[in-house]
Amino acid sequence: MNIKKLISGCFILVFMLLALNTFVLAEEAAVTASNAANDTQWIWAEVVGVDASAKSLTLKYLDYETDLEKQIVLGVDENTVYENIKSFDEIKVADTLSVDYVLLADGKNIAKNISLEKPDLATEVVPPAASEAKPAAVEATAPLSAENPAPMVTENPPAAVDQN
């Protein structure tokens, strides 16, 4: 009779361990799904559309995995933080943005941080205006004056000495 109790006790213990393991795995799956929905993504993109009434942006970006240009629509809310601009209203088509965003459970992308990328002025080359350009010969010669007379030119330069 003790053997029957021992075997039934083992079955109960195995059953409880399986039930606990299933519960833990289900909880881990729920946490993983929740984290996947709230993982912050980053994108560097060009603005191709601004919808002020819906408070959304359409952005064109390069998908590095497929090497294709794609578009994404991002919404903004009262928690969106702006850098290099004060508000959503300052964003224009053709601006370049760096955006941190999350995908919500309802499938909408919401921007958490939008940074307007300013062009690097140090690398931009701006040609001088035509009125500013001076010929190199004019810049290299000083005006003639009593202190700066014209150089002397001799008609017959000295003959070269042959040292053979």
Image (tube, grey):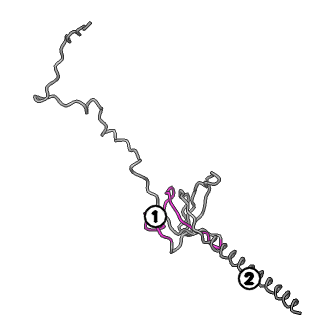
Q: Residue 103: x percent and y percent?
A: 61, 69
Q: Kindly report which numbered mark, 1 or 2, lies closer to the viewer in this rendering.
A: 2
Q: Is residue 10 above or below residue 34?
A: below
Residue 87 left/right relative to 36: left
Cα separation, mark 1 vs mark 2, equals 54 Å
Which residue is at 58% across, 56% downward? 61
SS at mark 2 in the image: helix
Bounds of the magenta segment: 80-106
At mark 1, the secondary structure is helix
Residue 23 falls in image quadrant? bottom right
Dot label at residue 90: 1
Q: Is residue 96 magenta?
A: yes
Q: Position of residue 145 (x, y in %)?
A: 13, 29
Residue 123, image x, y percentages = 41, 47
Residue found 51% across the figure and 61% down from its top: 98
Q: Which quadrant: the C terminus?
A: top left
Q: Residue lying furthest bottom in this view?
A: 1
Q: Earlier in the sequence, mark 1 or mark 2?
A: 2
Within-10-Å neighbours for mark 2: few <14, some 14–19, many 20+: few
Compared to 45, does 2 lie above or below?
A: below
Residue type at mark 1 is: Glu
Say whether residue 26 is magenta.
Answer: no
- The reply to whether discs 1 and 2 touch (Cβ–Cβ < 8 Å) is no
The kind of residue tagged 2 is Leu
- For the view shown, which residue lies furthest in the left direction? 146
Residue 118 position in % (x across, y down): 44, 56
Residue at 51 percent across and 58 percent down: it is 93
Residue wearing tag 2:
20
